[in-house]
Amino acid sequence: DGGITQSPKYLFRKEGQNVTLSCEQNLNHDAMYWYRQDPGQGLRLIYYSQIVNDFQKGDIAEGYSVSREKKESFPLTVTSAQKNPTAFYLCASSLTRDRVGDTEAFFGQGTRLTVV
Amino acid sequence: SQKIEQNSEALNIQEGKTATLTCNYTNYSPAYLQWYRQDPGRGPVFLLLIRENEKEKRKERLKVTFDTTLKQSLFHITASQPADSATYLCALQTGTDKLIFGTGTRLQVFP
């Protein structure tokens, strides 16, 4: 089955620790995105990547880092510098790196991160 | 500043009625606008895409309009059902490569 997979579904982190969220897609999509969603809120863009070995900051990149070493993988690291990391994290991909608004985005099922 | 606004208050309607959700944007000139459905604890699912040269797009019970003069899109669900209860998000492209989402509107359809 083609799709986009996030893991783990639930993640607990102690304060001061870095943690990495996994996102893998087998749709052969160029573009990949990471969003953060807080309760009752919309999606806020953290990072996005249009091509392997290249990525751009979104609106709330501080305290996060990413890599895009392979087309199918776009892991997100939540660092200890992120002041309020407890949230629902969503990874998405879309086919084209040009005219991204003209193609639908496919989302993973999300990772719920809790700092304890 | 650039903003995408959706009604943050939940929309409650009776089964069988038409639900209308609004998406307003400022300081953008998007060529495309998308609508997604999100159920609690799940990722959003794509519903419809409308282009700037299209005034209206339909898919089964769903209809989307796009008014680039008013900077507004309306999303309609006709003959609504309790299964339509969810949060609905609009999204648009900014610049050349970012997909940005609104805050979403929660729809509750009661029998």
Image (cartoon, coloured by chain):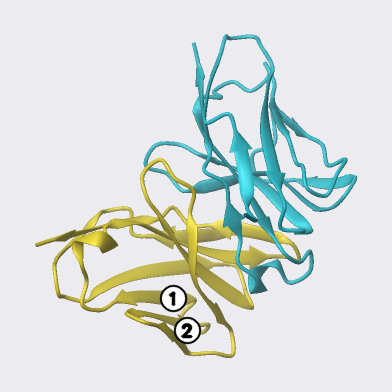
The amino acid type, in three-letter code, at marker 1 is: Ser
Mark 2 Cα-neighbour bin, 10 Å: few <14, some 14–19, many ≥20: some
Say which label, 2 or 1, has the lower sequence index.
Answer: 2
- Residue depicted at 54% across the width and 89% down the height: B54
Left or right placement of residue B78 versus residue B69 in this view: left
Label disc, if present, on residue B73 of the rendered structure: 1
Can residue B1 be seen here? The reply is no
Q: What is the residue that sits farthest to the front in this orientation?
A: A1
Mark 2 vs mark 1: tell me if same chain.
yes
> Of residues B108 and A106, which is closer to you in this image?
A106
Percent x, y of residue B34? 53, 69
Mark 1 Cα-neighbour bin, 10 Å: few <14, some 14–19, many ≥20: many
> Of residues A102 and B30, which is closer to you in this image?
A102
The quarter of the picture where the N terminus of chain A appears is bottom right
| Residue B10 sits in quarter | bottom left
What is the secondary structure assignment of the residue under circle 2? strand
- Residue depicted at 58% across the width and 84% down the height: B52
Task: Look at chain B in the picture and name its colour.
Answer: yellow
| Residue identifier under label 2 | B67
Percent x, y of residue B1? 59, 57
